[in-house]
Image (cartoon, helix red, strand yellow):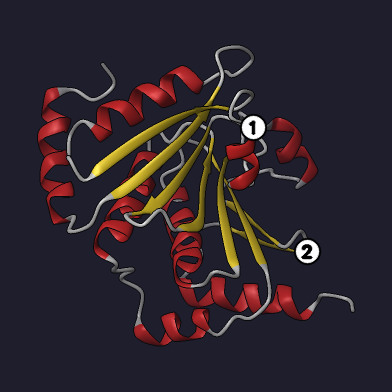
Amino acid sequence: MYIDDQLKEELQKVLSVLTKDVKIVFFTQELECQYCRETKGILTELADINDKLHLEVKNFVNDKADAEKYGVDKIPATVLLDENGKDYGIRYYGIPSGYEFASLLEDIKMLGTGVTGLPKEIEEEVKKIDKPVHMQVFVTPTCPYCPQAVITAHKFAYLNDNIKSDMVEATEFPHLSQKYNVRGVPRTVINESAFLEGAAPEQSVLEKVKEALNTIIV
């Protein structure tokens, strides 16, 4: 059991705000995947808590077409969709445990209520972005500041189809941590060209996204 009775009770209250269904698509494989089994266990128990949550488990190898459809290139991978199956580009690569479990809950609440909680003016600015943005937020489950960075990136993705945002668990994907010179977390990589350290305020993240778009060489 990953979610004990006391936490289950708390989660029932937290998830009681959901007014719409949320689909969780999880990609796994039995071999060569360090945290696939644990991640599947967490998601299965979470989905059992509220009937608005629907979990689909896919095999990364056998369900290759689905992995390609969602652009999933590593596992464990968790994709969140709304009740109509709309993909907002919200991804979790690695186990959403520890502090990152809070990020997952916030995302589920956002998709299940349609509310981001962002200030209106920031929402409007995010919606104006008209070029592709890929945000990768490197985290560890023991980092208390990481959820803020992940949630902000995922809110931006929710608001704008041009934005895709990944949570990447740094220790599970050391080759990526090395590639992007991740020395501390959270570290947000935007379009391979801009970097943001720490849990920055939403306005600062927005400015960094715009800066990344302006540095694209045509």
Task: Inspect the image, locate mark 1, and give the three-letter code of the amino acid beneath it.
Answer: Lys
Determine whether the residue tagged by mark 2 lies in a helix, strand or loop: loop
Task: Inspect the image, locate mark 2, and give the three-letter code of the amino acid beneath it.
Answer: Ser
CB atoms of marks 1 and 2 within 8 Å = no
- Find residue 16 and name its label: none
Q: Position of residue 10 (x, y in %)?
A: 13, 39
Q: Position of residue 60 (x, y in %)?
A: 60, 27
Tell which of 8 and 79 is nearer to you: 79
Q: Residue at x 61, y 12 (%)?
A: 31
Position of residue 134 in the picture relative to residue 214 (left or right): left
In the picture, which quadrant includes the N terminus?
Answer: top left
Q: Which residue is mark 1?
A: 64
Q: Residue at x 72, y 62 (%)?
A: 191
Q: Residue at x 68, y 43 (%)?
A: 183
Q: Which residue is mark 2?
A: 193
Relative to 119, does residue 136 appear above or below in the rendering? Answer: above
- Residue 169 visible, this orientation: no
